[in-house]
Amino acid sequence: MPYFAHESAYIDQPCEIGDGTKIWHFCHIQTGARLGTHCVLGQNVNIANDVIIGNRVKIQNNVSVYTGTTLEDEVFLGPSCVLTNVTNPRSQINRHRLYERTILRRGCTIGANSTIVCGIEVGAYAFIAAGAVVSNNVPAYALMMGVPARQHGWMSRHGHRLQLPDADGIMVCPESGLRYQEVNPGELRCLDLDESAPLPEHLTQGQLTYDSFKKENP
């Protein structure tokens, strides 16, 4: 099906918007932007020139994605998170030629009001906590918290903090039951799924209610 855009949204041409994408109130899609299929853009989202956005990306309210940024499939951007594209901006100096490349890999989550300093890569399925300031590359599956952000453990693809490994070095997601292991120092992998594949359909729906999950995982 074609994409949907609210009547208050501005969409500059030419740009590319995939089928099933929804663009809500007061958004602005600028020339040359490329949005994949089945994305959701909340209110007041700005997508700058030549930004590349994958499929099934969700961007919450009041977020600007600047030129030089690439969002891979299934990235989540929380409300009012901040992305940049120049390390040393000055109002009186034109630095358009110094835009830096920022890559948010597949499935990562950027929490509300967090800041991603330009020129870095956030690994697949990493989880940036609300309010964190990230200024260095982030490993896949890493949980990053604080100012400046530091790693505080690992997160599963379902977004749950993984507990300490068992005697075999295995960590299990409490919701999905998927197993994870640190295959090299600082490198986590899911043992049960293809890293490059989307979640199987039966795992895309929450397995527990919030109340039941909190009861089992206090």
Image (cartoon, helix red, strand yellow):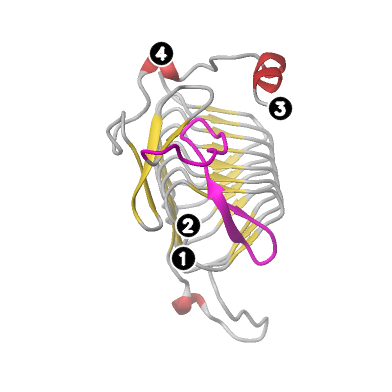
Q: Secondary structure at mark 1?
A: loop
Depth order, front residue of 181/106: 181
Q: Secondary structure at mark 4?
A: helix
Which residue is under mark 3? 218
Does residue 98 belong to the magenta stretch?
no
- Residue type at tag 3: Pro
Which residue is under mark 2? 49
Q: Secondary structure at mark 3?
A: loop
In primary-sequence order, the first of circles 1 and 2 is 2
- Residue type at tag 4: His
In primary-sequence order, the first of circles 2 and 4 is 2
Q: CA distance from mark 1 to mark 2?
A: 19 Å
Asked if the residue at tag 2 contacts the one at tag 1, i.e. Cβ–Cβ closer than 8 Å, the answer is no
Image location of residue 149, percent across then percent down? 62, 62
Q: Is residue 56 above or below residue 182?
A: above
Q: CA distance from mark 2 to mark 4?
A: 36 Å
Location of residue 77 (image quadrant): top right
- Residue type at tag 2: Asn
Residue 20 can be seen in this image = yes
Q: Residue at x 51, y 68 (%)?
A: 136
In primary-sequence order, the first of circles 3 and 4 is 4
Residue 18 can be seen in this image = no
Depth order, front residue of 144/25: 144
Q: Residue at x 47, y 57 (%)?
A: 49
Does residue 166 belong to the magenta stretch?
yes
Single out the mark in the foreground, 3 or 2.
Answer: 3
Image location of residue 1, percent across then percent down? 40, 18
Query: Where, quadrant-wise, is the C terminus in this rendering?
Result: top right
Which residue is under mark 1? 120
Q: Which residues fall within the magenta stretch?
A: 144-168
